Image: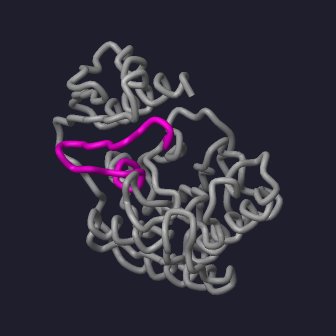
Amino acid sequence: MKVFISADMEGISGVVDATQTRMEEKEYERARKLMTGEVNAAIEGTLAAGATEIVVNDSHGSMRNILIEELNPLAELITGSPKPLSMMQGIGPGYDACFFIGYHAQAGASPSILDHTYYGRVVYQATINGRVLGETGINAALAGYFSVPVALVTGDRELCEEARAIIDDIETVVVKEACGRLAAKCLPPERARALIREAAQRALSRNHAPFVIAPPYTLVLEVLNTALADMAELLPEARRTGPRRLEYVADDYLTLYKAFRTMIALAGTLM
């Protein structure tokens, strides 16, 4: 059994502020240890379920957060940035399941810790075929493109509810309850890891259906200001449909995903 794990940081228990997620800040080293611990818990659960190959993709910020020297040696780590598939680098045909560890809710979710969608200083909202999606939905659809189901998601309660609204049979682990955007009631690491370990094993004990969005695909990207939209519009096939809104149409989801990332990257050059 082959399992892919995409790991973010904002959804890790104990992480409640952006300063904890940036490597130049003093609390970052604590946060990356907490992140590595929850990833290891997921790995332990997959091994207990019989997994023979586990690939972990570091999916936060610089994507150089997980401490490889503390990672379970039976897993492999994809680290560094930029990567062609960003948070989903390494996904492809042949995986039996995919986990999202330490994920956060989409931009505008409340109460939720550090809610955003891919690039918080650029994206206001992303919609695919009329449905508002955050990183969980966008990434789950990319896994589904390769016929890989997302079996487990961990993060705060709002994130877990968002995931269940998209994928009916998904396992979720709530590691913290947001009191606002920058405060939460958090499980101690030992308890959070125990729940993740158990859920990972449980998730692999049954079959899950991939999350698939039927083509053709229409992406509507709304950014925070018109200057960002000016830059995103430089992608030749992007169409400006409003002062801060762009549309991109494709028949292939991987193409749409790359276009989404390209528009964000172009807009991000202003930040």
Task: Relative to 20, say whether 61 is above or below.
Answer: above
Locate residue 19: give its quadrant: bottom right
Q: Residue drawn 48% across and 63% down? A: 99
Task: Relative to 129, say whether 27 is above or below.
Answer: below
Residue 263 at x, y percent in the picture:
41, 26
Residue sitting nearer the eye, 20 or 34: 20
Visible in this render: residue 2? Answer: no
Instruction: Left or right? Give the position of 220 relative to 269.
Output: left
Task: Relative to 45, say whether 55 is above or below.
Answer: above
Residue sitting nearer the eye, 254 or 175: 175
Q: Is residue 148 magenta?
A: no
Instruction: Left or right? Give the position of 69 relative to 108.
Output: right
Residue 168 at x, y percent in the picture:
26, 71
Visible in this render: residue 171? Answer: yes
Instruction: Left or right? Give the position of 78 relative to 23.
Output: left
Q: Residue drawn 42% across and 68% down? A: 111
Residue sitting nearer the eye, 9 or 110: 110
Residue sitting nearer the eye, 75 or 256: 256
Residue 131 at x, y percent in the picture:
21, 50
On-image quarter of the C terminus: top right
Segment colored magenta: 119-139
Residue 211 at x, y percent in the picture:
28, 57
Q: Residue drawn 34% across and 54% down? A: 137
Locate residue 236: give its quadrant: top left
Instruction: Left or right? Give the position of 49 relative to 105.
Output: right
Q: Is residue 134 magenta?
A: yes
